[in-house]
Amino acid sequence: MQNGTDKRGKKFAAIVAAAAVAVFLIFYAGFPLAVLWGLASEEALARLASAPIALAAAVSAAAVAGIAFALHERLREIDRGEEDEAKKY
């Protein structure tokens, strides 16, 4: 039973870490978008700032997708019992 509990703890830690980074990145892109939304009445400012904010949102979305893929791979490693294989090297 110890092995199952250990796997659950490792999975939980991986999920928490991935979620924390993903939430940070979402807020990183979302805050400037919210500010821009508030300033939308000033069209010149909105047009000027929209390209860099869209770029930040796209980069953040790509990073979150990468985090999701890495989390999926990590959970598969834990299920297969390979979670400590990197310690050998």
Image (cartoon, helix red, strand yellow):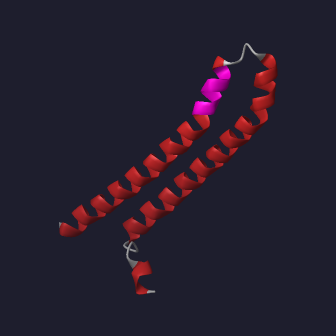
Front one among 5 and 59? 59
* Picture layout, residue 48 above or below residue 14: above
Q: Where's residue 15, x and y in %?
A: 40, 52
Front one among 85 and 19? 19
Residue ID at (64%, 29%): 33
Q: Main secondary structure of the magenta part?
A: helix
* Picture layout, residue 57 above or below residue 2: above
Q: Where's residue 39, x and y in %?
A: 68, 18
Residue 47 is left or right of residue 60, and the answer is right
The stretch drawn in magenta includes residue 64: no
What span is in magenta? 31-37
Q: Where's residue 38, x and y in %?
A: 64, 18
The stretch drawn in magenta includes residue 36: yes
Q: Quadrant of the N terminus?
A: bottom left
Q: Quadrant of residue 2?
A: bottom left
Residue ID at (40%, 70%): 80
Question: How many discs mark residues in the rendered view?
Answer: 0
Residue ID at (43%, 68%): 77
Q: Where's residue 13, x and y in %?
A: 35, 57
Residue lying farthest to the top in this orientation = 41
Residue ID at (78%, 35%): 51
